[in-house]
Image: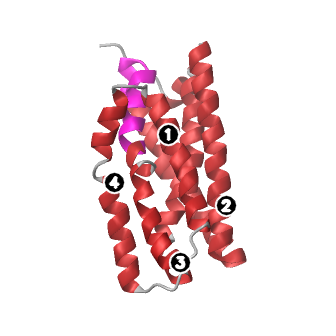
Amino acid sequence: SASGHSIWQILKKNRVFTLMLIACFFGMMGVMPISNFLVSLVNSHGGGSTALGVAQFLMAASELPSALVFGLLQKKMSSAKILLISIIFMVVKPLLILASGSLGMLLAVQPVQMLGYGLFTPASVYYANENVSQADRIQGQSVMMMASNGLGAMFGNLLAGYAVDWGGCAAMLWLCLGMGLVGMVCCAVSLRAGRNA
C-alpha cells in the first residue's frame, strides 16, 4: 500500500481540507463552551441542579438521532455541505440562548444540538475520508479531531472563561456567536474552493 504523508504535507497540499479544518476549529470554539459552561447558563436563568440535569439530558438525548439524520442528509448532499449545516446550527444555538428569556426557553433550545454538534461528528469523519488520499485517511481523521474537538474546544473554553468573568454569560454567548460565524464563513469558502478545484 502507498505510504501516507505527514500532517504538514497534507495541510500544505490540500487547501480545501485546510480551510475546512479552520472552519471546524472556529465552529468548536463557538459551541463547546456552551456545553462546558451550561451550569452558568442554567444558574443565570434561575435554575438549579434539577434544571441542569434536565438541560444535560435534553442536549445528550438530542445527539442520539443524529446518525439517522446524517444518513438521510448524506443521500442528498455531500459531507462538506452537511458540515456547513452543522456549523450554521453551532451559530444558531448561542443566538437562541441569547434570546431565551426564561429557563423553559433555555431548556427548549438544547435539542438544537442534534443539528449542530450531533451532525458534526459523523460528517467530519466522512469528510476527512473523502478529501484526503486513501493512504492519509487516518492522518486526516486525526487532524480533524485535533483541530476541532481538541484545539477548538481548548481555546474556546479558555476564552469563554475570561468572557464570563468580564461580562457574564451574555459576553460568553456573543463570543461563541462570533467564533461560530467565522467558522461558517471559512466553511463556505472551503466549499467554494472545492467546487472551483
- Would you name the residue on which mark 2 appears? 175
Q: Amino acid at mark 2?
A: Leu
Amino acid found under the numbered disc labelled 4: Glu
Q: Quadrant of residue 129?
A: top left
Nearer the camera: disc 2 or disc 3? 3
How far is the residue under mark 4 from the one under mark 3?
23 Å
Indicate the amino acid at tag 3: Ser
Q: In which quadrant of the rendered image does the C terminus lie?
A: top right
Gap between marks 2 and 4, in whole Å? 24 Å
- Mark 4 or 1 closer to N-term? 4
Q: Tell me the CA gap for discs 1 and 3.
A: 27 Å
Q: Nearer the viewer, mark 1 or mark 2?
A: 1
Residue under the image location 65 percent in, 38 percent down = 185
- Residue 62 location in percent, x, y? 33, 57
Q: Is 169 rendered above or below residue 58? A: below
Q: Is residue 177 left or right of residue 138?
A: right
Crowding around mark 4 (Cα neighbors within 10 Å: few <14, some 14 to 19, many 20+) is many
The residue carrying mark 1 is 85
**Whole-percent x, y for residue 136 in the image:** 40, 24
Looking at the rendered structure, which numbered label has been put on residue 63? 4
Q: Principal SS element in the magenta part?
A: helix
* SS type, badge 3: loop
Judged left or right of residue 184, residue 72 is: left
Q: How is the image coloured?
A: secondary structure
Q: Residues within 10 Å of mark 2 (few under 14, many from 20)?
A: many
Q: Given the image, on which type of amino acid does mark 1 rest? A: Ile
1 and 2 marks in contact (CB < 8 Å): no
Comparing labels 1 and 3, the label whose residue is closer to the camera: 3
**Residue that carries the numbered disc 3 in the rendered image:** 102
Whichever of labels 4 and 3 marks the residue nearer the N terminus, that label is 4
At which x and y percent is residue 66? 32, 46
